[in-house]
Image (cartoon, rainbow, N blue to C red):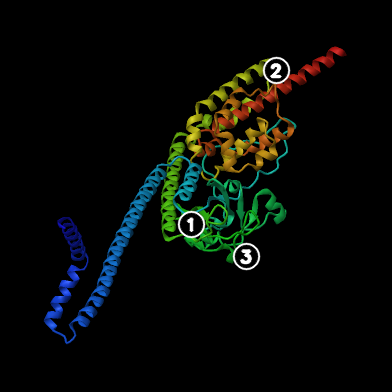
Amino acid sequence: SAGIAEGQFTALKMDTEYLKNTVGDALTRGCAVTATVRPADSVEYLANWLQQYAKNESIEAKFFAEKVAAEECVATDKAVADAADVAEQEKRALQVEGLKSLAALMEDPFELFSRVAHLVQTHTSAGMVYIGSLQADTKQLSELPDDDDGEDAPEPEDVGEAPEPEESTPEEEGDPFGYKAKHLAYVAASPGAEFMVGRELRRRAEEAGEADGEASGSVETRGITFALIDRGIPVVDVPNVLYKVDEVKFFKAVPRVGAYYAQAVTNAGTGEVRAVLAADTTITLGGGRPFTPADKAFIAEVSSVAGRCLEAMDAALADYAVKADDAHSPPPEPVEGDDADAEAAPAEATEEAAAEAPSDDNPAVGVEAAKAALGAAAAEVAAVQFDAVDILRLYQNEPPATAALLRGVLALLGTSPVAARALTWHALRAEVLTDDFFNALASFDVSADPPSSEAAGFLRQSYVSLSARTLWRESPLGAPLRNYVVKVRALMKVEAALAHSAAADAVAAAD
């Protein structure tokens, strides 16, 4: 019927469309090739051609798929590389910003060292960073007996420069910066390495023995770090410290896997090694791997900037010393024949003798005068506080005269002489360059809280051999503080005289 015929036509049309869309192109090409070649068995030839065509299509599809995948991989690699470049540029920008910030620190070497440790840990693979400041081996004050009879040794006169002793110079001994008489004191560390602060590394064990040295935080070096100083080696690079256990000192006693890298921090102007910037990657804070070339390059940059900052601080101290010399130079030599000037006693010695001399006529009046003089001396110290702190903060190594005097004053204020004597410059600064220290001086009442005989003796040792001119050259604090101490001792003496007078009067009344 017509309906059935129309349905069959529709089905046939759909089959034709299907064949046309799926195999039409292949059959058309195959038939065209078969017609051109005209083989003896055209059916077999066409069948073989179609089979090879199918294989070629598969190979071609695989080729294009691989090509697209390769292009995508290249694009991915480029994106990763571009992202890495951006990250490296951002990292470098942060490093440069950190270096600029570091270069502005020219007022305190210990603040500088703390920033160095933080900067290196932040921008390298270091797990721990610690700074060893090269410090002179401090000689303790000689043991002088206290003046039981109330008489001090003669004070030095500021009448000019004393002649230098005849001895061989460090240059003649091949040690121009006196390295052999110095040790490393660790004064700054990154988070996690704070246990290093306060430790010392010396060339030999303390006289009491290596065990005692370990307990006090002072240990014997085995050579590798001091090579930076003694042999002028700019860096020490140990990829794995376990291979150098005989030369590397492990402060926590147990060797660990990791790298150790140390860079000398030198004064940019003189070339003198001033500190050692040390870093490690030891487990557990570090990854245990050697430092990369980029890490080492950045550590070198940080060291260079720190060296320039130290040079600027040294220049500021030298400039202050010149100005102090100009402002506090000794009076001119007396003109020959000027009997009045020739016979005059040095002003400093005369004033101090007068300050410490008790009043024989009326001890009570002497006490009031001594208290007034002490108050004036305390005001002089307060007046120089801020300038003095700014100058003293510039010192990486302690100014010997001022440091000795400060230790004595700490004993006066209640610190035991043994503890005061043991303070390093780093620890001493933390005690005295504060408002609390100056407030304690201003409020100290020697009448209500007299020092022990041990503290009084130590106090005397701290200043008795110091000249005002030497103290002025070191900082604005030394000379006023020495005058304060003299006035304290003067008050102690007149009060002792008053007590003695009262006791004598009591005995006379009893008789």
Task: Pick whichever of labels 3 and 2 is earlier in the sequence.
Answer: 3
Identity of the residue furthest to the right in this view = 511
Q: Which mark is residue 263?
A: 1
Q: Are marks 2 and 1 in contact (CB under 8 Å)?
A: no
Q: Are marks 3 and 2 in contact (CB under 8 Å)?
A: no
Determine whether, in the image, residue 232 is placed left or right of residue 200: left
**Residue designated by label 3:** 246
Compared with residue 258, is residue 457 higher up or lower down, i.e. above or below?
above
Q: Position of residue 270 (x, y in %)?
A: 43, 54
How packed is label 2: few (under 14 Cα within 10 Å), some, or many (20 or more)? many
| Helix, strand or loop at mark 2 | helix
Q: Are marks 1 and 3 in contact (CB under 8 Å)?
A: no
Q: Compute the Cα span from label 3 to label 2.
A: 68 Å
Q: Which mark is residue 363?
A: 2
**What kind of residue is marked 3?**
Asp
Q: Position of residue 283 (x, y in %)?
A: 57, 56
Identity of the residue furthest to the bottom in this view = 40
**What kind of residue is marked 2?**
Pro
Q: Compute the Cα span from label 1 to label 3.
A: 20 Å
**What kind of residue is marked 1?**
Gln
Determine whether, in the image, residue 390 is placed left or right of residue 211: left
